[in-house]
Image (spheres, grey):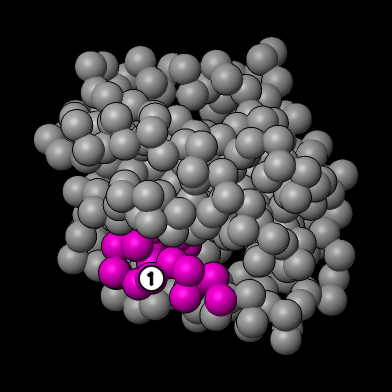
Amino acid sequence: MAVDVSGRALVLGGGGIAGVAWEAGMLAGLKEAGVDLTTADLIIGTSAGSIVGSFVAHGVDVAEAIEGLSGESAADRPSDPVDMDAVLNAFAILFDPGITPQDARVQVGKLALEAKVAGARRGLADIGLRLPRREWPARPLLVTAVDTADGAFVVWDRDSGVPLPDAVMASCCVPCVFPPIDINGRRYMDGGTRSITNADLAKGASAVVILEPMAHVSPRTVLAAELRELGAARVAAIGPDQGAIEVFGVNVLDPALWQPAFRAGRAQSAAAADEVRAVWNA
């Protein structure tokens, strides 16, 4: 799917709790520096980015949103530890150049369906409950996910007939962490299993800014192919700096990362401001 939008697009990639907080910190810091990415004509959210995108599209202050999310999470942290080995194994399949992307997603979909993670269902439901609104925003917002059965990539918007909380929960459904989400008789998992950014959905935009929390661990070939799809658009792709990477650690789903990752993003925004300004404010 490609969207023909002549304006500016904001692409918010996946990255767990660390990604949500880091992206929010970047947005807050850039706005303070005179680069307001929340004025985007199109917002594309994958996994963590779908949460941030929902807040942005509804006009909610991201700094206040993180404050609220971190407070709620601190009071109700999941009791079941994340099996990071299972998660890493799933993404190793997705990153294997010897397997076609579609076949890889089918294999990971099978792992996601078989994983014994039913206890995490409440945590996934909380994601939907913590959105600013249950309704889709008036502003263009795209949310991505992948069908566990056939690996098909899906993109939902306000005209798709899928409730926003369901779309966001599906997009955030990290395989082997959360149970896939049932929507209209199909089971869906994280949109990041197709791409951590899905930046090619911004095709047609004149300017594109990509915030990519997992840039340091994601294959560059995927983003490179997406950037080629963007043609002559002005593009800035920003990943975490070394300080942010050290804050993230190994488990980006750790609820303790809300405030540290937000601060890391805000601190990094100063160094990224000139690059982003040249694209966004041109």
Q: Residue at x 29, y 30 (%)?
A: 278
Q: Residue furthest left?
A: 6
Q: Residue at x 19, y 48 (%)?
A: 41
Q: Is 214 above or below relative to 97?
A: below
Is residue 128 visible to us here? no
Q: Residue at x 35, y 72 (%)?
A: 60
- Residue 279: percent from the left, percent from the top? 28, 31
Residue 244 belongs to magenta span: no
* In front of the other: 52 or 145: 52
Judge left or right: residue 209 versus residue 125: left
- Highlighted range, magenta: 50-67
The quadrant the N terminus occupies is: top left
Location of mark 1 (residue): 61
Which amino acid, by three-letter code, is at mark 1? Asp
Judge left or right: residue 140 versus residue 78: left
Q: Is 110 above or below relative to 217?
A: below
- Residue 270: percent from the left, percent from the top? 49, 43
Helix, strand or loop for disc 1: loop
